[in-house]
Amino acid sequence: MKTFNDIGLNKEILKALGEMGFEKPTPIQAKAIPHLMSSNQDIIASAQTGTGKTAAFGLPSIHMTKINEKVPQTLVMCPTRELCIQIARDLTNFSTYLPGLKIVAVYGGASVDTQVRALRQGAQIIIGTPGRTKDLIKRKKLILSDIKRVILDEADEMLTMGFKEDLEAILAETPYEKQTLLFSATMSKRIISITKKYMNDPIEISAARVNLGAENVQHLYYMVHAKDRYEVLKRIADSTPNIYGITFCRTRKETKEIANKLMQDGYNADAIHGDLSQAQRDEVMERFRKRKLHMLVATDVAARGLDVNDLTHVINYNLPDDEEVYVHRSGRTGRAGKSGISMAIIHTREIGRIRAIERISKIKFSCELVPTGKDICQKQLYSLMDKIKKVEVDEYQIEPFLPTIYEKLESLDREELIKHFVSAEFNRFLDYYKNSRNINVSESPRGKNSKPPRERVSQKERRKSTFASLFINVGKNNNVSPSRLIGIINEGLNSSDAVIGKIEVMKKASFFEIEEKKKAQLIKALNGTVVGGMKLSVEVANEKQARDEPTKSGSHSKPKSRGSRGGNRDGGQRGGNNKNSGKWRGKNSSAGKGRKKSQ
Ligand code: ADP
Ligand code: MG
């Protein structure tokens, strides 16, 4: 493999890389950097999270910057504020020995004046989120007429989040003659087809899907009733005294709920999601990076691209909608030769999804039993005993207190002393787990235990929000997936705030629920727009449409009754790639509170 030196990066960059401990390029860097330095051809590059994409576009951009020209030459767009800051930090590190090179991050939730001042000083590389970038262009504070290259980092995420219009507006401000680079962890055909519009004869490059560290990751799942998910999380935390991990949830709402519960239960946890202010997000990330926080609860988008090392655990509180996303999530542990554990908490009907992940990723899962109360108490006690044995004793500091302490404990002999001491530390645990249940359930789909009693909960929960059920004339045949449908809805509403309920994607059409108050706006926005060559038609669902959509199994029932029975409701996909069967219904039912596309 080539070294950074062989690639021909200038010596200032090489010096910084040396100090940062970058010895040789990662596969995506080895492919992308030489191309960028020698050709103007556009690139679509995909490589998993953690494979060094930032340096893959950042190093050549820095190398090619004309430092004496104090105008923006490179524009990097990314979906979140954190990512923006992180990319700016990485690029700043790479250019430590290029004092004339200025890198500025522009993102919402922070003072616009500070950013304007920074831009005025002649930045050559701009890293921005679409909203703030567009805003600064409008105010004429950011002039893109000399841009040589535009990089869309986490491009797929920006598009699914509904930033398409902003991106188009921004790109329209850049010169026609430029290089456009797309970097992403996942790259679906749909994204490629959308982005080709922005690109000129791009070459596609990708690097091996799996991280170097992936062989160090152990994958396992716990199978429980959906209502016991939180209990499992708690037990995992209790049985892993040194846990340092991310728990992935599906929605902002769930993220908040789980983090709040954990905090109330005394865990060192917090959440990161799109509803937090910039300062709050920074504060949470800072604590997590410094390991003052042990469990970060996050949505995929909020955690996307964030570079946090040495995680011991990745916990899938819910499986992601897309199998590939599981691979990205789990790639956050087991890095740099360290071992890590990626675990999924599933209910019986999700075993098919575990198998689907195994098929696409060559990952092998083991089924583990949720630790029992006894296991947990044992782990905790033994870990404490180890700590006590190893603790450093500062004779001098404790000396003055000892005589009184000896006196107070005089009546206890050695064994009694140990018992008291263990109880003082552990009564809370022992009490909590004294009568703990076995919450594991069997894998048999017909097993007595296997029906998760979640629908009852969801029905009740669901009544809290009023949803309208809508019909849309695109489905799987038009490459529409549930997440794509969320993207279409968000793009239509120009925001990702709408609460979306159940989604059911069939072959030629789909049904979905949207909060009643957004119904009219959405119908108006979407009707007549074109998606994948199809002119959209959206209307309030009625029973006729439900009957008209034929399914293979012929057992499709009315949207009204959806949610009341199990089974494969998505006639087109049986067995094999059983991606949607029961899944959407299941998740929405168990969350029961509708969904938001989180940021
Ligand atoms: P991605 O964008 O693909 O998710 P990042 O660019 O955030 O990945 O990089 C992940 C981590 O790997 C960062 O901590 C980065 O500093 C480190 N890294 C990147 N390239 C190299 C390299 N060639 N050698 C050593 N570490 C690297
Ligand atoms: Mg990245």
Image (cartoon, rainbow, N blue to C red):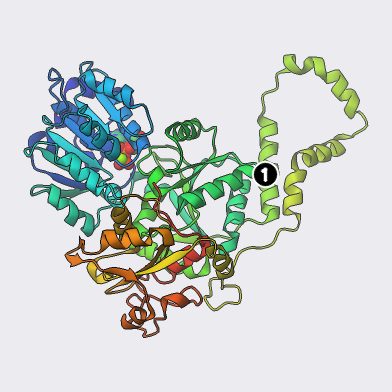
Q: Is mark 1 within 8 Å of ligand 1?
A: no
Specify few, some or many for label 1: CA neighbours under 10 Å numbering under 14, 14-19, or 20 or more.
some
- Against 457, residue 555 (above or below) is below
Residue type, mark 1 in image:
Gln
Any part of residue 439 in sight: yes
- Against 528, residue 4 (above or below) is above
- Image spot of residue 166 (x, y percent): 24, 43
Q: Is residue 1 left or right of residue 426?
A: left
- Against 247, residue 131 (above or below) is above
- Image spot of residue 471 (x, y percent): 33, 71
Instruction: Determine which quarter of the picture holds residue 77.
Output: top left
- Determine which residue is flagged by label 1: 380
Count of numbered badges drawn on the protein: 1
- Image spot of residue 284 (x, y percent): 49, 35
As helix, strand or loop, the secondary structure at mark 1 comes to helix
Instruction: Determine which quarter of the picture holds residue 178.
Output: top left
The residue at 52%/64% (across/down) is 462
Q: Which is more toward the observer, 575 or 197?
A: 197
Q: Outermost residue, bottom direction? A: 554
The residue at 83%/38% (across/down) is 420
Any part of residue 94 in sight: no
- Against 399, residue 553 (above or below) is below
Q: Which is more toward the observer, 320 or 414?
A: 320
Name the quarter showing ligand 1: top left
Q: Which is more toward the observer, 257 or 417?
A: 257
Q: In which quadrant of the rendered image does the N terminus lie?
A: top left
- Image spot of residue 430 (x, y percent): 75, 49
The residue at 11%/31% (across/down) is 145
Instruction: Determine which quarter of the picture holds residue 334.
Output: top left
